[in-house]
Image (cartoon, rainbow, N blue to C red):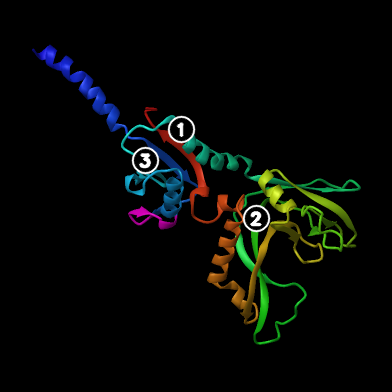
Amino acid sequence: MRTSLRTALLPVCLLLAACGQEPQVKLRFDEAIREGAGIKGTYLDSLQRLFQELGYRPGHLRYTLVDGDDQALMVRLQSGPLEAVQREALTARFTPIVQAREHWPATLEITAIEDALPMPLRTSFTAHGRPFMVKQANLRTLDRPSSLEEVFCRIEVKLNEALPPLSFQRARNWGDEDQPGSIGVLSVDSENVSTPARLHFSDPELQKAVDERLVEVIIDNNDHLTSPIKELVFEIGSMGKHVLLGQRTLLGDGYEEDCAHMAVKTGRPFNLFMGQGVDRLTAFELLDNEG
């Protein structure tokens, strides 16, 4: 009898084990997503929108933090097995985000368009930077108590390898409107002799954004070429006109947060390293019985 009972129960146990393996995804991000005992709301909102776009009902999703890892979570998708088309859709949505990070840290190489440069100009960096604001160029209003100024959002990133003293400015002469944003004027000596040059980024999405002038690259210490270049600056765009009290107003937390959000909205590569959302993903794993 004992043998017959054990044999009879075996298929039921296997069935329960299979049903107990509910399909889940394990997601890991490049910063801590824990907030208190739960998950940061910005990450939850981003993931909820994504899963809804993929056809999952919010009431069926369950989010749990991974023990011992503040940067990872598990998402239970539904009670039954996934269809093949669902697995393909999940992979197609998450994998490109992880793959986009393969180009980072990115390299930057500056080359002359006409003649060879006296030395190679090459460095690397990550597009995680400090947001800051500047006023429109050539306006001297610091002596006034307040003024209405146009403010521009810029992101400063640290270079892994310093460049020699130099200055690169995007070509702004009349007739240059159709030139890629990576083409500009390079100065590499104190005599301020300039030569046409081009920026080459190893990350294709950043190269595209620069070439299409979605962001502007500025390389200049504003010290008459006397010190090495340790930072790279990306100008994201105008933040509109604001009443400024000298330059101190530009350092407000509200402005910095708006500038960072503006950079994230431009997309790759800034949303890989700034903001709080699904684009900060570094690893994706689908845990499923495959039907």
Query: Can I make out residue 33 in this image?
Result: no
Kind of residue at disc 2: Lys
List x then y, in percent, for residue 246.
65, 81
State the residue lying farthest toward the bottom.
145
User: Total number of numbered labels?
Assistant: 3
Give the Cα distance between marks 1 and 3: 14 Å
> Helix, strand or loop at disc 2?
strand
User: Label 2, on which residue?
Assistant: 158
Question: In the image, what residue type sits under mark 3?
Answer: Leu
User: Mark 3 = which residue?
Assistant: 77
Range covered by the magenta-colored residues: 35-42
Percent position of residue 194, x then y? 88, 58
For residue 85, the mark is 1
Residue occupying image coordinates x 61% and y 77%: 248
Q: Which mark is residue 52?
A: none
The mark lying in front, picked from 2 and 3, is: 3
Identified at 82% across, 62% down, the residue is: 172
Q: Which kind of residue does numbered mark 1 sit on?
A: Val
Q: Earlier in the sequence, mark 1 or mark 2?
A: 1
| Residue 241 position by quadrant | bottom right
- Disc 1 to disc 2: CB gap under 8 Å: no
Q: Nearer the viewer, residue 14 or 250?
A: 14
- Relative horizontal placement of residue 178, taking residue 147 as reference (left or right): right
Q: Are marks 2 and 3 in contact (CB under 8 Å)?
A: no
The location of residue 87, given as percent across then percent down, is: 45, 33
Binning the other alpha carbons within 10 Å of mark 1 as few (below 14), some (14 to 19) or many (20 upward) gives: few
**Residue located at (81% from left, 50% from top):** 198
